[in-house]
Amino acid sequence: MPIKQTVAFTQQPPNPLTPFLLRNYTQIISKPKKSEHKYKTFRSGITFLFDPFLVMRRPGLHRQHGKQGGGSKGIYVKLAISAVVLLICTFSLFFSAAIGGNRGSLDPSEINVEELWESAKSSGWRPSSAPRSEWPPPPKETNGYLRVRCNGGLNQQRSAICNAVLAARIMNATLVLPELDANSFWHDDSGFQGIYDVEHFVQTLKYDVRIVESIPGIRKNGKTKKIKAHQIRPPRDAPISWYTTVALKKMQEHGAIYLTPFSHGLAEEIDNPEYQRLRCRVNYHALRFKPNIMKLSESIVDKLRAQGHFMSIHLRFEMDMLAFAGCFDMFRPEEQSILKKYRTENFADKELVYKERRAIGKCPLTPEEVGLVLHAMAYDNSTLIYLAAGELFGGERFMKPFRDFFPRLENHSSVDSSEELATNTRGLLGSAVDYMVCLLSDIFMPTYDGPSNFANNLLGHRLYYGFRTTIRPDRKGLTPIFIDRENGRTAGFEQAVRRVMLETNFGGPHKRVPPESFYTNSWPECFCQMSPKNPADKCPPHNILEILDRQLENQVGSDLEASVETNSAPSKEV
């Protein structure tokens, strides 16, 4: 087994499945940057100042004191100076505490912009989705075939594919290559084969499930009979028990089942770490985009990287999300009519009050609000920003305030004007390129990370890809601050924004708390430590792929022996 596969599959920062990304990963994360050296030096200085043992052990310290000594008079002078310094420091600390009150309300320098360009601290955790307990290969004989139709956008489809692989494993079924929905919003019928690397997908998951491109026919009485999959609409967030009872029974009756729609067909929270790790293997290893998409992404990242650090923002200020969220009142009457019509045609009827929705953080941030947050965090107009977004609802009227803050704006079309992107900028291809560029950016900022959103999967991928920095605005916490500003109360605005932002997580390991999705945060199931306190968090052995290969080879050998015995049995009887 190639070494690079072993490294990517187990403990090292995972390769998003192409050599160029591994190269970029090494450049972006593993290689120290100038700012990182400065930060480490600064931290070393702090440690030195406040650790008396280090001071006492500092080479040459006592010899220096000996030279400057001057007897008891010198000692008294030094003691007096030390007392004055201590008194000044005490008053300084007291004064700062009286003003600040807590860490979140300290001086704005508490948000270190240079530090945010680097990845978050890992606390010793490494991404790892390899099995850590007994994990037998898929048996030759399965219970039937599983077809699924993955509806929604890129994020929903990726999640659905992960769920489909897990469902096939649970039911001991052969998975038919997932179908991607070609709906009216995407206007894209690329299908799985048009977006993802099929061969890589099948090869990566060979230890987990059997995969075929289509349901084969059955030879009976000299004729080939086609198996018709029995169609079922799975319950939303169906538990494992539904698959091992209802779905499995229908599969055994008909030989194949077709689950549609399948965007939320399996519960996210499952009390089985190995099942969750399988989801991560699918999402972060098996689902590799096709070479043309990876090449386009590489080209864009290289051009942006040539200009220095860059931040990516998913500006989710689009018609479908605004209509879904019920955020209408900020728009003109004719625009509100368009949004309400779209909502009526595409979503369930529900009474939504804009002020209430905004107050609980259910409305996407406006472009201006995004600019205000970043400006308050001390990002200036030299910041290079890549925008991943569809068509902005409301047009330039809403975009201008943001552009005034940050004029250096790019998107995939402005960086790469190739015909391939130009003809599919709003389809799955454009979304896939945006996904890869956002994955590799120094910082990623979603403006709306609600359910079934592009940002959710990306947040989880960046966490798995080395705890890469994310800026996740707390919309509920920021809303009253924005409302005060709109009402003319602007004093202390930026300090208030910083207080809220300091309470957020910038990409490091953190406990998953509902409603946060497993696909947004797969810690701790898909991470490990070399020297853990909890044995369950211990990294798998370095030769895990060799172990899985041996298991697979042994089973193939057993299947071959069984086949030979079956074929030779009639001749023995004769």
Image (cartoon, rainbow, N blue to C red):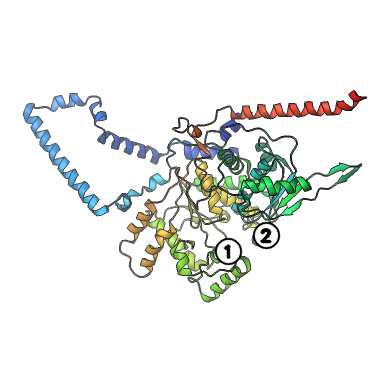
Q: Quadrant of the C terminus?
A: top right
* Outermost residue, left side: 73
Q: Residue tagged by mark 2?
A: 183
Label 1 sits on what residue type?
Asp
Q: Residue tagged by mark 1?
A: 320
Quarter of the image for residue 451 reads bottom right
Is residue 501 toward the left or the right of residue 178 in the image?
left
Please indicate, yes or no, whether residue 290 appears anywhere in the rendered image.
Answer: no
In the image, 239 versus 347, the foreground residue is: 239
Where disc 2 sits, the SS reads loop
Is residue 303 toward the left or the right of residue 39 in the image?
right
> Between disc 1 and disc 2, whose residue precedes?
2
In the image, 455 versus 297, the foreground residue is: 455
Where disc 1 sits, the SS reads helix
Residue 499: give x, y in percent of width and height: 35, 55
Is residue 388 toward the left or the right of residue 511 in the image?
right
Please indicate, yes or no, whether residue 23 appears anywhere in the rendered image.
Answer: yes
Residue 503: give x, y in percent of width and height: 38, 51
